[in-house]
Image: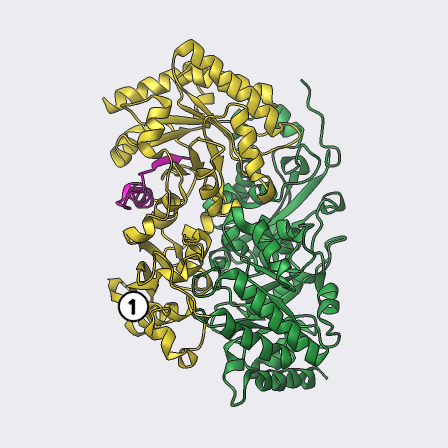
Chain colours: A green, B yellow
Amino acid sequence: MKHSAHPVLSGTRFTVTYTLTGNKRQALDKAHDICYEQTVEFPPDLVPESLINNGIVGRIEDFGRSGRGSYRADISFSAETVGAASGGIELTQLLNVIFGNISLKPGIKVESLALPSDMLRLFQGPRFGAAGLRRLVGTADRPLICTALKPMGLPPLELARQAYLFALGGIDIIKDDHGLADQPFCPFGERVARCAEAVHKANGETGRSAVYMPNITVPADNLTQRVRSAVERGAGALLVIPGITGIDTIRLVAEDESCDLPVVSHPAFWGSFTVNPYSGLSHYVLYGQLMRLAGADAVVFPHHGGRFAFSREDCLNIARGCSADMGHLKKCLPAPGGGVTKDKLRDMIDLYGRDFILLIGGELHRGEKDLAENSRRFVEMLENGVS
Amino acid sequence: MKHSAHPVLSGTRFTVTYTLTGNKRQALDKAHDICYEQTVEFPPDLVPESLINNGIVGRIEDFGRSGRGSYRADISFSAETVGAASGGIELTQLLNVIFGNISLKPGIKVESLALPSDMLRLFQGPRFGAAGLRRLVGTADRPLICTALKPMGLPPLELARQAYLFALGGIDIIKDDHGLADQPFCPFGERVARCAEAVHKANGETGRSAVYMPNITVPADNLTQRVRSAVERGAGALLVIPGITGIDTIRLVAEDESCDLPVVSHPAFWGSFTVNPYSGLSHYVLYGQLMRLAGADAVVFPHHGGRFAFSREDCLNIARGCSADMGHLKKCLPAPGGGVTKDKLRDMIDLYGRDFILLIGGELHRGEKDLAENSRRFVEMLENGVS
């Protein structure tokens, strides 16, 4: 039987830019290796001529020095290597071709992707995106503010009390701390019901549209059920940890027709991908491009200078990845957090502009007043900061 | 409302051993930080006394020097932090507590886990395990042999022809190359039907019990459907890339009641976790302990000295993790591969003993004879090698 070509992707190629360490010879060897390892995975001398001619083997499109002891290679792959017989693209297989086996080899970093519009069209991308998220919470002119319900260990009623006060104080998005799952001391269903109710109550008093965002990171067979449970109980957005559940689960939630809520990614378990400057995935591609392909409306990550190890440049690259041109895919919002304090506001606005979600946690619990008053003061400070 | 404790886990704690870089003071600071960051995620001075007293905050159980500029900390966590209100344990939340946020901090590596039997009892673990896999393929006395159908780009009939010859030649497990998904040039359903049929045909001639193992790495919403499709078409084992689909999908397949097949993990996309000696996850914990908790019956990884960067020590640690005592959890089989050639057999047997799956790829295509004859010679060589 002759197999027909992919209905859309036949002849289409996409390009991945890699940074490769070593001298020129070594880096070029790595580039050639990627062409084979990521596709035919076969000794080059044994690959049938036809598979090289028909473009299944990757191709080096460009190669040049990128820094001291490092080179840049643009390598193109046939879109058919990631296409599905049904006509779409499998995001899982796209990840596999971009960085599957070569993740196991040292000195190879994925810097960025360039997907042609034929391919981008097959991704829905963020359902809300930056503009949609703004509309949802009704905050037009300043960075959005998000805070977390914590600490782990408190029961639903305690967290709901916090949620009420935060919403009353003007916080836009009130999220579960990422460590809240379905623990016996704080069961998911009851927590979501109580917290969503508390935020709705506060909205009734303020006339605002704050949303409650539960953490739906969950075993694979329960994800869809947990999305439904969150929707039914009045959640306004959903938080997922793709480092744990797999990047494709972001897409699953973003495309879930039973729910029409924004989905936000959390970076837990992802540190290993970005910890090494010459290995893994760039901040730009992981937090920016891949999250938008998957459909995240916002991406949480650690702002530099807090208690995590990201640099200012890393944060800037995430922001760039969230808004770089990707055809019809909406921009998503960077959501820097992790030890954000008042004295960092100026730098954050300088770095991200107005289009970001400021994620503030423990700091709001530290003021002399109650959570609502602390939140109010913080919102005011931010409004003054950008005016 | 008072929340009741977890029916099984109340009072139970589990321990994670971390390697921490720095001098003693710095390493101890990191250990304290892990206790808070992985649980309450709150400034220590703001944590309610009750959450420290009831054990929600992690506890340093042991701390000592482990090498030049590195320390070892045993940190215990309440099992309730990972328990589900329904009574079980969420593997996703276990991963989150072990390494979620602290993955984003430098110089922290997860070395090993110690879960008490109360917790281990809540995991099914490998359904077949090492002994069950041996029984399934009917090979009692030597390492099992697995090879891959490749290269990507060939149509189902070509791969089925290979599968037939490999099975005829005595290969135990014939797997999809991990880059085979559902591409237009080789659709999943047709590939599985043809290849399974080819292996069954060969089994009829040899009287052996070789199995065909398709790659079921797939978007999240299609996994269960693809498992069913593979079962219906006669697959004998299933290959998953948990680095792409999430570790918990291994569990989903291992516990799927609609299928009674072994599940094997492939290491693509996982390189970043182990590339750094002082950050990420140890080979022992990722390929060994976590895969057994999830239920993998065998784990593929690159044997040292091939085209990947694992050391002999890394491989040994994987083998140890596959067979270390974990209560009722069955042992799983290490499946070293990645550029295995005949001259490596002696070392592999020295290193892994008899209980492993030897994964050989391109090398079988290199002999002067056809794939069946090349396979036969290789099986014989292995049998002589261990006799």
At label 1, the amino acid type is Ile
Indicate yes or no whether the magenta region holds residue A258.
Answer: no
In the image, is A224 to the left or to the right of B90?
right
Front one among A322 and A311: A322
**Across the whole image, how many numbered discs are drawn on residues?**
1
- Residue B8's image quarter? bottom left
Which sits in the foreground, B12 or B45?
B12
Q: Which of B249 and B212 is in front in this view?
A: B249
Q: What stretch is highlighted in magenta?
A: B312-338
User: In the rendered view, does A109 fall on the left or right side of B35?
Assistant: right
Residue A219 at what x, y percent from top left?
49, 50
> Where is residue B157, by image quadrant?
top right
Image coords of residue B247 (percent x, y): 46, 47
Q: Can residue A267 be seen in this view?
A: no
Quadrant the C terminus of chain A occupies:
bottom right
Which residue appears at 32% of the width and 69% of the height?
B27
Q: Name the residue under label 1.
A: B60
Secondary structure found at label 1? strand
